[in-house]
Amino acid sequence: MRNRLRQRAIVSLLKTNDSPPKILASQLFFLFDVEPRIETITDNMTVENVLVAVGKILRSKQRLQEDVGEWARDLFKQAGLPFSVSSAAGSIGSEENSAPLPGLSVVSSQPATSKPAAQPKRRNRRIYLSLAIQYLEKGTRTHKGLVDTIMEQFPNLNRETVSTFVSDVQNPRYSPIKDRKVVKQADGTLIFKDKIKPALTVIENPNFAGPGNEAEPVTEKQVSGGDL
């Protein structure tokens, strides 16, 4: 059951992914409860290469029993996406990348004399980021409330992806909003830590003894223990 849920989550990530390669890799490691290993994930790696690279590490840690190539190919098939892996898009350790995976189509590199093809710009689908920041500034939405608000504004988005985003902003390691920590308040609402107002300190008035116990006003006759 756990494996099926994890597989569905990965397919959802592949369908809606708009994250840089390192964040995508971190999300995949997170689903397997494995400490992220992203130091050799490069910015020019495709989604296919990230998935294969992560799969090799998971297999080396015995968290993945399947053949990496078949595992990656099947996930892309479920997501309805074409699958190809470029041999020049980066590597993860020589011991894990020493031979091409069986069954994968490898895109040959361009000859040295030819001009390298321009990399297509990654389309940013995280159009809800500014909306999320707006509500995190106010601190008026819980995790579910923020997801509901984003889905109301952008109903075509995948709810699971949005929920993952809201979870990520609460973890400095994965948050796309750098240098601003998000905390959960006592009522469950999420807010930027720098937007929390300090609590007011009540200073006790020594001349006020509280309801039903009012202090007697001092009269002239009480000065020095007698009349003037």
Image (cartoon, rainbow, N blue to C red):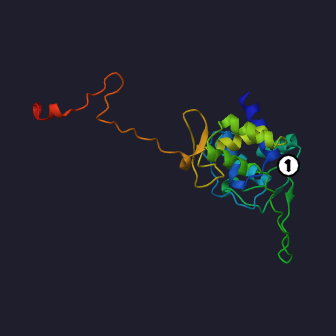
Look at the image and tell me in which quarter the C terminus lies: top left
Which residue is painted at 76% across and 61% down in the image? 89
Rendered location of residue 62, percent (x, y): 66, 40
Alpha-carbon neighbours of circle 1 within 10 Å: few (<14), some, or many (≥20)? few
Q: Is residue 182 left or right of residue 68?
A: left
Rendered location of residue 109, percent (x, y): 83, 66
Q: Is residue 74 left or right of residue 211?
A: right
Q: Which residue is mark 1?
A: 103
Q: Is residue 175 left or right of residue 75?
A: left
In the displayed image of the protein, which residue is found farthest to the top? 212
Viewer-proximal residue, 43 or 198?
198
Viewer-proximal residue, 121 or 179?
179
Q: Amino acid at mark 1?
A: Gly
Which residue is painted at 69% across and 45% down in the image? 27
Q: Is residue 172 visible?
A: yes
Look at the image and tell me in which quarter the N terminus lies: top right
In the displayed image of the protein, which residue is found farthest to the bottom? 113
- Decide: is 210 above or below 134: above
- Decide: is 136 above or below 185: below
Residue 221 position by quadrant = top left
